[in-house]
Amino acid sequence: MAKKKATPTEGDNKDYIPEIWKEYTIEELMWWVINLTRRATHRLNKEKALEDIENANNYLWMMSEAVKEEIADES
């Protein structure tokens, strides 16, 4: 059985500055989700479409975390 990742972006951590995604606004993260899912519907290559969906899911996770943090800050 494959080891479960701590976060959906864990495998990408070596390619990016740690937690740099936190600089995006919630709206910017939302647009990544929208654009990647829409692009997936345009793909003829199913592997690339699934990769777009996986990336969209990663941005959706980031957006969810940003919303949770905003709610916590308001408390």
Image: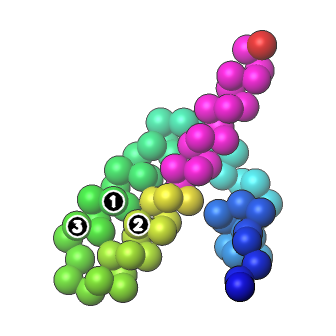
Question: Looking at the image, which residue sits at the far front?
Answer: 1
Within 10 Å of disc 1 (Cα), the crowding (few <14, some 14-19, many 20+) is: many
- Residue 37's tag is 1
Which residue does the image show at 73% across and 14% down from the upper left? 74
Magenta stretch: includes residue 67 = yes
C-beta proximity under 8 Å, tags 1 and 3: yes
How busy is the neighbourhood of tag 2: few (under 14 within 10 Å), some, or many (20 plus)? some
| Residue at numbered disc 2 | 53
Secondary structure of residue under mark 3: helix
Structure colour scheme = rainbow
**20 left or right, relative to 42:** right
Marks 1 and 3, how far apart in space?
Answer: 7 Å
Give the amino acid at mark 1.
Thr
Residue at the image position 23 percent from the left and 77 percent from the top? 43
The residue carrying mark 3 is 41
- Whether residue 16 is visible to the viewer of this picture, yes or no, is no
Q: Position of residue 61 (x, y in %)?
A: 59, 50
Cα distance, mark 2 to mark 3? 9 Å
Q: Position of residue 25 (x, y in %)?
A: 57, 37
Badge 3 amino acid: Thr
